[in-house]
Image (tube, rainbow, N blue to C red):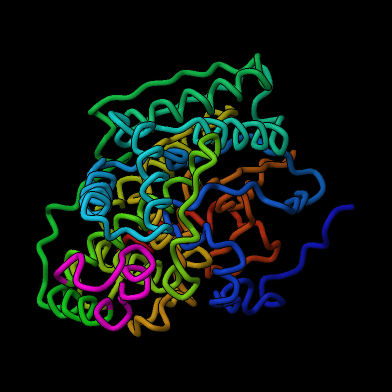
Amino acid sequence: MKKLLLPFFLFPCLTLCAQTTKSEVLQDVRQTGGTYFAYQAPASEISLPPTGYVPFYISHYGRHGSRYMDSFKYYERALRYLSLADTMGILTGYGKDVLARVRAASIDAIDRDGDLTRLGGEQHQGIAARMYERCSEAFSEGAQVHAIASQSRRCIVSMGNFCMSLKDKAPAADIFMETSKRYMYYIAAGTKEFAATHQDSVYEQKTHDFEKRLFNADRLMSSLFIGKGYPKHHSQQEQLMWALFKIAIDLQGLPELSITLWDAFTDDELFAMWQMDNVSWCRSIGLFPGCAPRYKAHYPLVRDIISKADSVISCGGHGADLRFGHDAMIVPLAYIMQLDECRNIPTDFHELYKYFSSYKITPMAANIQLIFYKNASNDILVKILHNERESSVPLKTDCFPYYRWKDLKQYLENRMSN
């Protein structure tokens, strides 16, 4: 049955008021992996378009799927501390078990820094299949699908998996894939031109103080080692705890190994470490007042979305523009657009997770899709999907969750004018 479409003013809070809670995070501890959280297909269907409107074009930006950690150093650190303790005879029985699991996982990870996992490929195949099921009209005969990937291997392989799945569903579509340094300025823009401000230094110290209050490795160390004093220094204990945490959150992208490390941590420890990582995202992109606005480096991506949509509309074409990149693009794009879960960001670090949750914004294979619809009068509506779930922007509309393209386009241009 078609869902009832109501005016925007009848949705005064939308999901904006649905703050994230600690219990919600810990319902599935994999979510404490933040940007390592393995993509979950949406459980509910999206709204049907208003009568007479059909989808004809999709503008998409997708993060690569689940991957191996981008550095083997975390395995090296964990193995160094645990192996030395084993030779010293100070590993507990549980510590020996953790060492065995880390060793087994490390063997699989050798020379695979940053590579896409099998699950990562499957995630993109699934997203493509669901995109076709929702918008088959956009991929009918004559459809032009242009896919561009960052030059990173994991992005290229993600694109291949996505387009392979889409071609299987839409054999009549003309799908062209490419990657080039030429496109990196908007597919994976850098932020070096934004020099750090005084407030960046203030928030860096604030982050250090926040982490110092939250971080406590005592319980974990006592579970792994007999007696006290190893590792000797707090910084070494911190290194080991973070290494094991990084391994734990990454292993969810490798279900075929049947190895986990979640049991090494309590729920409170997982929640605390996720909060620390969550804060770092807002800092690095410049979302706090007075910090260098590094998110502005990604305005070219928004302009690319606008220009390509206008081009398809003006020529009466249909199809899709698919972009494959990184989490460092998804977060600023969501912020620039002011999507749900990425606006009204507080400066109180203890409250931040309630309004900004990295696992909701940019899990592995995260994606933002603008689906364009038109009717016989060529009136253009757009629906925004964030991770295949209907999202909103703070823009009035009389047909939520749809926006008129002329209004959304103006809204996006206005967002880039300040």
- The residue stretch that appears in magenta: 211-233
218 and 308: which is toward the camera: 218
* Relative height, residue 14 to residue 145 (above, below): below
In percent of width and height, residue 58 lies at 57, 38
Q: Is residue 330 left or right of residue 389?
A: left
Residue 104 lies in magenta, yes or no? no
* Residue at the extreme right of the image, as rendered: 1
| Residue at left offset 46%, top offset 67% | 357
* Residue at the extreme front of the image, as rendered: 89
| Residue at left offset 68%, top offset 22% | 169
In percent of width and height, residue 319 lies at 58, 28
Q: Quadrant of residue 362?
A: bottom left
261 and 93: which is toward the camera: 93
* Res. 234 in view: yes
| Residue at left offset 53%, top offset 53% | 406
* Res. 151 in view: no
* Relative height, residue 402 to residue 317 (above, below): below
| Residue at left offset 30%, top offset 46% | 300
In percent of width and height, residue 144 lies at 54, 22
In percent of width and height, residue 252 lies at 50, 47
Q: Is residue 70 left or right of residue 351?
A: left
Locate the C terminus and report the quarter of the image it occupies. Answer: bottom left
Residue 213 lies in magenta, yes or no? yes
